[in-house]
Amino acid sequence: MPELPEVETVRRVLKKDLVGLVISDIEIRYSGIIEDDLNYFINNIKNKTIEDIKRRGKYLIFKLNEGYMLSHLRMEGKYFYVPNNSLDNKHIHVIFKLNNGYSLLYQDVRKFGKMSYKKEDELYDTNPLNELGVDPILDTNIDNELIHSKIINKRIPIKSILLEQSIITGLGNIYVDEVLFSAKIDPNRPGNTITLEESNNIIRYSKEILEKAILNKGTTIRSYTSSLGVEGNYQNFLNVHTKNICPHCKNTLTRVKINGRTTYFCNNCQR
Ligand SMILES: [Zn+2]
């Protein structure tokens, strides 16, 4: 599943290819991807120019000359930028024809991805972006005490809190495990037991780990391979996720399910 570094990597590649192009036509083959009324979506995006591609959390934001297209890749969503009619398969659900003879294809084996159109004034004030917490890469003035007060308000495991995206956004199953290992926090700990110092460490390591992962173009593991010819390398830097032995104390790592997600941690180093 793409997390913040993988989405950021896709954003950078798409931005290089797409800025300045006009979406001349849209073909929707599976309407479940589109959260809007289909005609509303098509009418607002067709004939618009792609001016920029941004990101918040795990959302891609296509800035058009009027309004925005939001896209969330969820488990398996991928984009391909190819000459018209040069690639097709049954998992391609949305085709954006561009004015240069190329198409942007959206492929999604699991069909969980979502797209929607947002007007200028709706983008950050409506669902889903208004429900996201701070983005450790984009937000430079994070209020540490506010973050801590939100975490200690919850009694669910800290791993679940971080997966929710409402306090800190961008971390998924892989990077939450890595952040909690660096912060020496047991992922099962309820939010209301997390100290201010620990909360500050979560913020600090989220930023550090996500930055390093972006530099390495994300992580390529079984559950996610990028499109657009980009292979991430951060799997070479993972400390605990998918691993057996703690790199710090050589203890055998513990593997448990939290929120149904396989979680790796060291019960010696993480308390
Ligand atoms: Zn250890």
Image: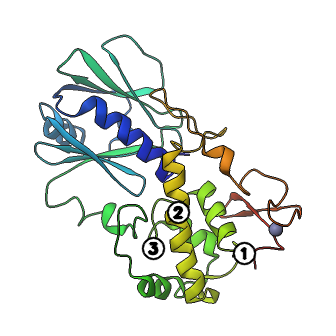
Residues marked 2 and 1 touching at CB (< 8 Å):
no
**Figure quadrant of residue 128:** bottom left
Judging depth in this view, the residue of 89 and 64 nearest the camera is 64
Judging depth in this view, the residue of 26 and 143 nearest the camera is 143
Q: Which residue is mark 2?
A: 208
Identify the amino acid type marked 1.
Asp
Which residue is painted at 67% across and 38% down in the image?
A: 222
In space, the residues marked 2 and 3 are separated at their CA atoms by 17 Å
Quadrant of the rendering where the C terminus is positioned: bottom right
Q: Residue furthest top?
A: 86
Earlier sequence position, callout 1 versus callout 3: 3
Identify the amino acid type marked 2.
Glu
Does label 2 point to a residue whose CB lies under 8 Å from ligand 1?
A: no
Indicate the colouring scheme: rainbow
Earlier sequence position, callout 2 versus callout 3: 3
Looking at the image, residue 32 lies above or below residue 145? above
17 on left or right of 243: left
137 on left or right of 45: right
In space, the residues marked 1 and 3 are separated at their CA atoms by 18 Å
39 on left or right of 105: left
Judging depth in this view, the residue of 233 and 199 nearest the camera is 233
In space, the residues marked 2 and 1 are separated at their CA atoms by 19 Å
Identify the amino acid type marked 3.
Ile
Res 167 label: 3
Q: Which residue is mark 1?
A: 186
Q: Which is in the foreground here, disc 2 or disc 3?
A: 2
For disc 2, the neighbor class at 10 Å (few under 14, some 14 to 19, many from 20) is: some
**Figure quadrant of residue 184:** bottom right
Looking at the image, residue 111 lies above or below residue 92? below
